[in-house]
Image (tube, coloured by chain):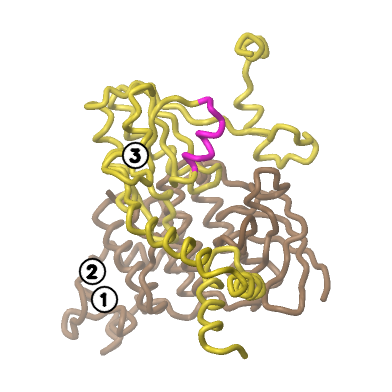
Chain colours: A yellow, B brown
Amino acid sequence: MYIDAVEEVIDALGRLPGIGPKSAQRITFHLMRLPVEDIELLTSAISLMKEKIRFCDSCFNISEQELCPICKDGQRDKGMLCVVEEPKDIIALEKTAEFRGKYHVLGGSISPIDGIGPEQLKVAELLRRIEPERIEEVIIAMNPNIEGEATAIYIARLLEPLGVKVTKIASGLPVGGDLEYADELTLGRALVGRHPVNEEYKNV
Amino acid sequence: MSLYRDQGIVLRTWKLGESDRIIVIITEENGKVRAVAKGVRKTRSKFGGRLEPTSHVALQLFRGKGELGIVTQAETIDRFQNIRSNPELFSDASAMLEVVDHVSPDQSPDPSRYKMLLGALQTLDEKSSPLLVPSFFLKLLEHEGLAPELGFCIKCLDTDNLVSISISEGGVFCNKCQRGRTISDTSIAVMRAILGGGLKQALEVKDMQTVSEIDRIASEAVEFHLERKIRSRRVMDT
């Protein structure tokens, strides 16, 4: 329908997550109208990112150097380690400003149906960090789905003999949500994970 | 285009777009159905937690023009708590879901296959046995008409001295016609029990040699007929 050069851009953009053919077409026509300098800025930013980005040697977060900024930060609590599935989970947790420890990115969760077991994840690397880094508490922050649960339990079992405290982020009702709309699994977990109210107001 | 209700077991899910999932469900009355569950990856989703692999759910679905339906309501019937909280059981359940997914054609109802999977998941959740998954594989193959012949030598029809089995040739061999891999008398007897109404007793077998022999044969048979590897098997064996 379009000339080849345009078709190629639409195809390439259409392969990005969340971008359908219609959005790809709209972005392409927007790019066509942009001045050359803006296009160069965009393409060089993408190439530079691809060149510079690597995984942190310690936590497997995305990084520009051997160690990511979080691993290099001497101000962070060295005894606390939060285990997450993907680097983007670190960004979500950092936004809370509640956690000042370090992270470990597993690179996914146990999903037998996709052929992903512990060997495909950075589990051995996690175990190797515990002793040398004198980790006292590991907080498991996996996605609250069946794969995340299986991974959390698997990791907790491996960490237990190492004498480290293993905790899991609480799961329950979203702030601002209505109780009546909560599904029974979430509500059940919220009940199991209940805690004394006075602890809450003492922390405020 | 219409709304319909059915119950089913979620076989697997795929991420779709920003917050949706494609859910593959084996239903009791409508066979294997693929449907979009909108917004289930958002933390405020009403039924995200109900539509995970292994979940047994009552559903309301919308049948549109295309191949994909839409999940409009989902209620949990059984969430198999033990499977959810044990990685090994989850791996076993995944292997059964994976195989059912591959043997079931889209929208071709087969209530007995559905009931077989439901029964197997219930047993796995309540009282697992090392022979549960291999038994499920053998029963499923039998249901599809693909179970290996265990009663007589498939070459000379002799019913005695059965010593080996060949999955590709479809059954056991006597000591004169011997082909394939060797198999013990106990394993043949247990496999016959599994396929011949003695499943309950067969699940009590704990002898590791027999269990691993039957496990190997059952997995090989399923993989041979599916013409693909079962990815869920062995991922937890580390």
In this rendering, does residue B110 appear at all? Answer: no
For disc 1, the marked residue is B165
Where does the magenta region start and end? A89-98
Q: Position of residue B78 (x, y in %)?
A: 64, 48
Label 2 lies in what chain? Answer: B
> Foreground mark, 3 or 2?
3
In this rendering, does residue A79 appear at all? Answer: yes
Neighbourhood count class around disc 3 (C-alpha, 10 Å): few under 14, some 14–19, many 20 upward:
some
Q: Secondary structure at mark 1?
A: strand
Q: Position of residue B208 (x, y in %)?
A: 27, 51
Q: Amino acid at mark 1?
A: Ile
Residue at 38% over, 75% down:
B228
For disc 2, the marked residue is B183
Labels 3 and 2 share a subunit? no
Q: Position of residue B114 (x, y in %)?
A: 60, 66
Check if mark 2's residue and mark 1's residue have beta carbons within 8 Å.
yes
Provide the major secondary structure of the magenta segment. Answer: helix
Neighbourhood count class around disc 1 (C-alpha, 10 Å): few under 14, some 14–19, many 20 upward:
many
In space, the residues marked 3 and 2 are separated at their CA atoms by: 55 Å
Labels 2 and 1 share a subunit? yes
